Amino acid sequence: MDDGNSFLGRLLNSPTAFTFNDLILLPSYTEVEPREVDLRTRITTKYFINLPFVSAPMDTVTGADMAIALARLGGVGVLHRNCSREEQVNMARRVKRAESFIIRDVVTITPDMRVSDAIHIMNENNIHGLPVVDSFNYLVGIVTWRDVRYSDPNNLVRDIMTGRDKLVYSDESITIDEAKKLMNDYRIEKLPIVDDEGKLLGLITFKDLELRGKYPNASRDPDGRLLVGAAISPFDLDRAKKLDKYVDILVTDVAHFHNKNVMNATRVLVKEVSADVVVGNIGTKEAVLDILSRIERVDGFRVGIGSGSICKTGVVTRVAAPTLFAVANAADALSEVGGFGEIPIIADGGIKNSGDIALALAAGASAVMMGNLFAGTRESPGRLMALEGKYYKEYYGMGSSKARAKRMGLDRYSMPSKEVEEGVEGWVPYRGALSDVVSELRAGLEAAFGYVGASNIRELWSKARFAKVSPSGGLEIRPHNVFMVRG
Ligand code: XMP
């Protein structure tokens, strides 16, 4: 007999690294209707989002448009890093400026500048009003597009601005409802916020207040701006620090995080940034335990290796930790040290539909990261192509030669594999607006919770019961024996 330590024993006693296709959730007695399900979830130790969807940091998935659209729908985007630092910072700034309650980095003008300058600054920043401040940042007036439109470009700002005597402004304690009322009463579009001495602190715009009403489910930071993450390399502290000024979450973008140099670099990095830091990718229990013992602050785990639809890692190396298997392992490791539910797990790679999302969450994830499903939407940065009457969007792996040609994310992969392609290039069907894709995924997910009898993610963790499916069973539980005209 084999003692388990021999080569044959190691083969025979190996665990089953099950994938999304291998398992199902069993139905249970339920009192939960899908529309009652609450999908709010923790995305990092500090932040919560209303929908457990995260977009992957890939240059065919998440730029500013995707991050804005997904945060408005309740999820969060992680900006890709296959670009210069400045480009990535600019994406982050765009997301943060998309809407807010009080805008903090207000674009201003001084009274001695000309109307032509005001027009130029407004056009440059795509805004329609500028608080006027003196050299000590005291608020002295406001100019709006209406003021400058018909004015002589050579006039001075002080001659056309609404001056301090007629200015409507407020202090920081104002609530959203009070701001709405004040702006309605005075028929103004911009409300400057000042401190006790009258120095400018921020600006509230009517447009932002309207957007709040339009996207009640949005993921927001404490200032009411959209929540956003950004991918980083642990070896590029400078980029991380620059992004740290704007983003809420930094996500390490490393194919194999359980690596001495990567962990050492991250240990330094977490002390230098204030954003929450999600580390990954990892795929085993030991990785979780090792990381927690070596890195002082870990705000989330990005889990799954080799399951991504564009991944070639499993083929090139025969090394993988399929997402579902990896999530369950990570969840167990966290339970062992009492961190389960406190340090969230983001299941990353291989999600094909809402059923896979339900499985990933049930196995212990707090949220799922998706590349493929989001790459096909209007908001992704990838190219759109028509082929034989159908539309497709470009989607490629960050380890593919196309992504690597930009050379910005090469350190995602380990030294030897820098020579090897670990991703493929391809196209995915065009799926239209992100909001439609998200609604469909959400509806499917809520239905799954209904079948299981769970009204939120915590309940799903405790109530979910799994069953293995045979290959023939797998075929049976999907549409079969029909000539499909739709679906
Ligand atoms: P899906 O299945 O949503 O997966 O397309 C997206 C995730 O795949 C990972 N990723 C890669 N993995 N080679 C890999 O082995 C690659 O070239 C590659 N590019 C992305 C990544 O974790 C992403 O979130």
Image: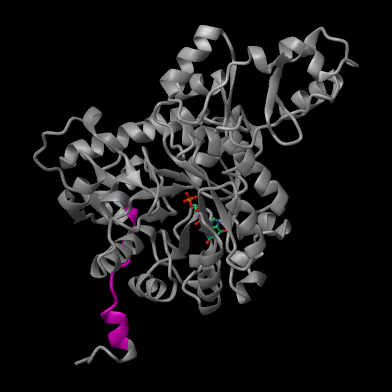
- Residue 449 placement: quadrant: top left
Say which of 324 and 145 sits in front.
Answer: 145
Quadrant location of the C terminus?
Answer: top left
Query: Which residue range is magenta in the image?
Result: 8-20
Residue 204: % across, % down: 56, 25
Q: Which residue is drawn at 15% across and 40% down?
A: 453
Query: Above or below — where is 140 with respect to 227?
Result: above
Q: Position of residue 289 (x, y in %)?
A: 35, 73
- Given the current orientation, which residue lies at the most extreme front position? 197
Q: Which residue shows up at 58% across the image and 58% down it?
A: 232
Q: Is residue 261 magenta-colored?
A: no
215 vs 419, left or right, is left
Which residue sits at x=45%, y=27%? Answer: 436
Picture coordinates of residue 328, whole percent (x, y): 29, 62
Q: Could you tell me which residue is drawn at 65 percent across and 32 percent down?
A: 106
Residue, far right = 154
Q: Where is residue 105 in the image (x, y as percent from the top left)?
A: 64, 37
Q: Nearer the viewer, residue 107 or 394?
A: 107
* Of the pair 313 and 485, the residue shown nearer to us: 313
Q: Evaluate whether residue 171 shows in this view.
A: yes
Q: In this view, does 432 lie above or below 77?
A: above
When asked about the image quadrant of residue 293, the answer is bottom left
Side of 374 relative to 40 (left or right): right
Give the vertical position of 281 relative to 153 (above or below): below
Its colouring scheme is one colour
The correct choice, above or below, for 120 with respect to 265 in the image is: above
Q: In which quarter of the image is the N terminus?
A: bottom left
Residue 429 shows in this picture:
no
